[in-house]
Image (cartoon, grey):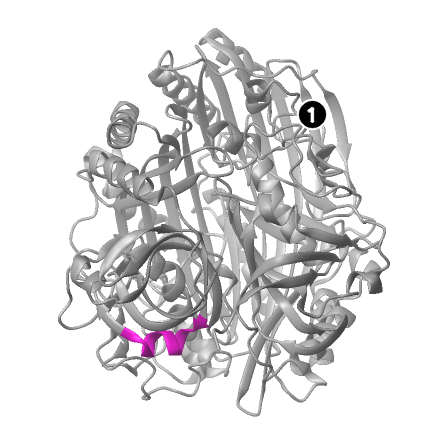
Amino acid sequence: MSPEDGGRLLGVCERIVEAALRRGADQAEAYMEQGAELEVDIEKDRVAFTGTGQSRGGSVRLVKDGRVGFAYFTDDAEAVAAIDRALRNARLADAKDYALPPGRPPAAMRDRFDPGLAALDVDAAVAAADRILAAAKEACPDATVAGGGVGLGVGAEAIASSEGVACHDASTHFDLSASLVLGESGAAVAHWDHVSGHHLGLDPDRLGRDTAETVARLAGPVPADATGRFDVLFLPDAVGEVLTDLVVHAVMGDDAMRGKTMWSERLGEAVADARLTIRDDPLHPDAVGVAPFDGEGAPVQRVPIVEGGVLRSFLFDSWDGHEHGRPSTHSAVRNGFKNRPETGSQHITVAAPSPRPLGRLVADVDDGFLVGSVLGAHTANVTTGEFSVTAPNVWRIRRGEVVGPVSEIALAGDLTSLLQRFEAAGDAPKRLHGALLPPMLFRGLDVAS
Amino acid sequence: MTDGVIRGRRAPAAVELETVLRRAQQAGASFADVRVETVEENRLRIEDGDLRGLVAGAETGFALRVLVDGAWGFAASNDLSPASWRSALEQAVRLAKATAGRSEPVRLADAPPVRARVTWRPKIDPQDVAVEEKRSLLRGMEKAVRELEAIRNVTTGYADATVRKQYLSTDGSDIEWGLTRSVAQIHFTARSGGHLAGRSTRVGGTGGWELFALEDPVAKALEAAQATVRALGAPAAKGGRTTVVVDGELAGVFAHEAVGHAAESDLVAAGESCFRGRLGERVGVEGLTIHDDSTIQGAFGSFPFDDNGVAGSDKPLVRDGVLVGYLCDREHAATQGMEPNGAARAQDFRHRPLVRMSNTMIEPGDHAEEEVFDGIRDGVFCKGSRGGQVDTARGTYLFNAQEAYRIVDGEVREPLRDVSLTGEVLHTLHNIEALGDVQRLGDPGYCGKGQWVPVCDGGPLVRIRDCLVGGAAE
């Protein structure tokens, strides 16, 4: 695939839109995506599997008499049948007087297409996997590299509509991951880590080494013997697990406007410590997993969610915006060609003034915990923001120093209280797929062990 | 119909799968298999009375897997043209050769070739049920819960998927099978007196429209809503260790998260399981029996054949407290010296098969249900599941309850909110004090392991001592 494939898909989209209008749609939008991936999987200190896949498909969303219909197809020749299916679905839908969004130029964004990745070179991918394995084994010879691997991908997408949307994009992605286990069955410790980017240049050696050093630091945990309120320093992955999903659910425009989230009636109110800023920022130069336009072809933009601790905005696509009389925040996302666009986040960033090195954050804790990751974050109650999770990869901090790993602890709380107990952020945010998150220190969280 | 404008990319000629396999062998494959999979689906979602998503569609794709010089190569595509098949074969062989000879060659445990044509036909095919009737079911669920004043927002959803698979291998297997799965679900929020709560529940399984006569989604939604409203404003549980009783659904999630994942032979082989090296050892109390059964009629995780072409089966994992088996695909059955037992599942044609669960069950014990609570001075009763997760290497698990109640002197008392349970598998299995005598199947669900597959689980009431409850410190 090449960057030009996006343009070719756009041509197909435009022909589908024309066909939809000919067949009776008042307005029509066509979306197409095409991609190929290569994965090299590690299992038990070796490359265990290599695989590749390719996929192409599209969908049509149309408006007929104010009603919306949607259908998808996997062969361009089925597009017309999909149009007819979408027209039939529109007849069953409620009349909403909805109109597709107008076309606008996409946002300016740095190049995210690396020809070196697009070639999906298996030898390069295997070499990267070998480097993860070698670096991990060198850093911690007793550990087993149980899983992980290398993923390379290339994709193109395009959207055209009768309202002037005409945009296309192509990008590549590169993912490295490692999962290490150390110790005997029943007393083992484990750690998984990963890095993602759009270009070659991620460092497999560093990932392997860092993951191995972390699992070594987890060895020999002692019981935490701690129930009460403690300061807790979350590393970026734990921030992502505990905080990001809950924030995004809390500000989904449709849910929020219907009163379905704990922040439904709090726009303009303080919901977090006054130093905290949370944005949906696809324009951040370090963003991974974004495109210049959203799932409806609108240019992506920076959306302030929380600024100075105050809730500033909910997220809307054009449909949810229309439902609630709000403008779209250009927050439509596509979960593959089989689904109609829906509101979602693009790239969540968290920032606070005067970020500090991790060591300084640790030094600020008299009695607490350093949490690397949590289990069960997806079981949090997204309506109330309440969470009750367990942290298996956790270290005790006493008098400003990490004194060693402890067995799992249970952490409980709710999103708003958590954000109000924020104390400080680290100065080295981690680039995750769809988020850029720093370490974060919170005071007085409920801990049980 | 082409409208004269849009041309397809597929040639009409069908590809002979036997020819593909023969060419794989000619290219050096000692083993090859191919899956061709078609999924036809219907989905609809209603938000507070408005039809938001109505989707009907179908996709067909294929996956080709080759073993060349002891290394795997895999290629998948939804382009069924002969050129795409040729390209897939070339790529799969090239990938396999790129990693061949670097480590111990992959071996596959023997599996007798199967030639079968099986279709689990639903009694009432959802394709024959009008969209309006499906919408009416969802309307009924919404109307029932809205009878309660505190219910504010209601989202209902319906989905059916009919799967047809073809599996052929160079070992001589030639299988065609199909089934249908159907689900109706509801999510609602309740708000009263400044208190807010949210809850989901789901009815469905492997089958068609008849499933909703076997278990009434309207009644189930109402029951869940009533419990949620009763719990509005309930205090958080006190964090710490205590005795808990879990209902059949949560017991099933425990079996799935804490035991089933640790018994997946790929994780065992990779050293990522706390059950590694423990076959034949006592891992739990006497009387505890856990198995994974993909043959349960109507259960959401059931299937006739796995994606290695092995028949689905009832797989004992823990029998009377002793670890007696793992879940095995052909590859990891070989490394463990076991037989494949039909546990290889792929999310769809885009994915390679992994070792997965189906319907994971704890067998009932001999305690009458009321006896399970006897003697608990101060504990927690947890009902329903909001999901769970496990770190299989350590054996640390967490799951969250939909409903929770305080137990005082053996009696179920006032509700608690947002209770999670956590612990270590090898510790908890020895702390089971009682198993109720009635087994219940939980809600249909999906299990994630890099891929999503439909699963179900269940069990009896289970009493566990010294369980860590996540909650407020004060």
Taking the image as shown, residue B46 lies to the left or right of residue A302, namely right
The single residue placed furthest to the bottom in the displayed view is B193
Which residue is more in the foreground, A354 or A303? Answer: A354
Q: Which of the 4 quarters of the picture holds residue B265?
A: top right
Q: Quadrant of residue B223?
A: bottom right
Magenta portion: prevailing SS class = helix
Give the side of residue B3 with respect to residue B457, left or right: left
**Residue placed most toward the observer, B130 or A230:** A230
In reply to whether residue A327 is colored magenta, the answer given is: no
Q: Position of residue A338 (x, y in %)?
A: 50, 53
Please state which of residues B241 and B329 is positioned toward the viewer in this rendering: B241
Q: Amino acid at mark 1?
A: Ile
- Position of residue A58 relative to residue B109, above or below, is below
Q: Is residue A382 visible?
A: yes
Magenta residues (range): A413-422
Q: Position of B122 compared to A236: left or right?
A: right
**Residue A168: image location, x then y, percent:** 28, 53
Q: Secondary structure at mark 1?
A: strand
